[in-house]
Image (tube, rainbow, N blue to C red):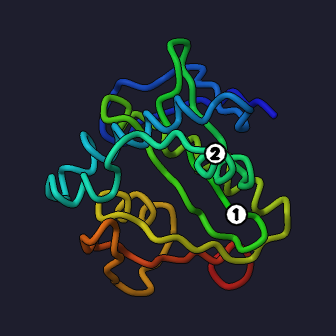
Amino acid sequence: MTEVVRTNSENSGKSFPGLLVRSYAPGDARALGEVFHRAVHEGASRRYTPAECNAWSPRPPASRLWEARLADAETVGAEPPDGPVGFMSLDPARGYLDLAFVVPEAMGRGVAAALYAVLEGRARAAGLVRLTTEASLLAEPFFARHGWRLVARQEVERHGVLLRNAVMEKTLRGADA
């Protein structure tokens, strides 16, 4: 499924008009692995040390496990004409938003908001009542702006290094929907 989403930035007048948000397709894994790696090393480095970024993403993922992780989830990517600039994935069975990454030059330009709008819309259409995630320190304010609440702070281990993040949730139906 392909959707054209209008983007507006909260932080800048620079957006991606006509940004294409589309479902994951076979062959996207390598490019999305590069987006992930760049987002960690160039974007998340605002809140994490070089050692933490290296533990989180020692190299761009390109394995069959990475491909399966993207394919098995409801994964959507954002593309202006020159290639992918972000992606998000949702496990529809658990309502778990697993991956949410945008390249640094696209941050603050409405890309994450466009991706999230598509996934939340699909989650609502599927009848999900609650979404959860483990948001990085960089992503936590984004999710809070979109109605998510902090459940707990935690540390997770990656390659022998502890990374801080925020367990968050959002109710889609009910009191705050």
Which of the two labelled residues, at mark 1 and mark 2, occupies the earlier sequence position?
2
Drawn side of residue 94 relative to residue 113, left or right: right
Residue at the location (43% across, 26% down)? 15
The image shows residue 28, relative to residue 56, as above or below, that is above
Q: Name the one closer to the observer, 109 or 55.
A: 55
Residue 4: which quarter of the image? top right
Q: On the rendered image, what quadrant is the N terminus found in?
A: top right
State the SS at label 2.
Answer: helix
Q: Residues within 10 Å of mark 1 (few under 14, many from 20)?
A: some
Q: Could you say where residue 65 lies in the image, as x and y percent from the top left?
A: 62, 52
Q: In the image, what residue type sits under mark 2?
A: Arg
Q: Nearer the viewer, mark 1 or mark 2?
A: 2
Which residue is identified by label 2?
A: 64
Which residue is identified by label 1?
A: 91
Estimate the spatial distance between the alpha carbons at disc 1 and disc 2, rounded to whole Å. Answer: 18 Å
Q: Could you say where residue 9 lies in the image, as x and y percent from the top left?
A: 40, 36
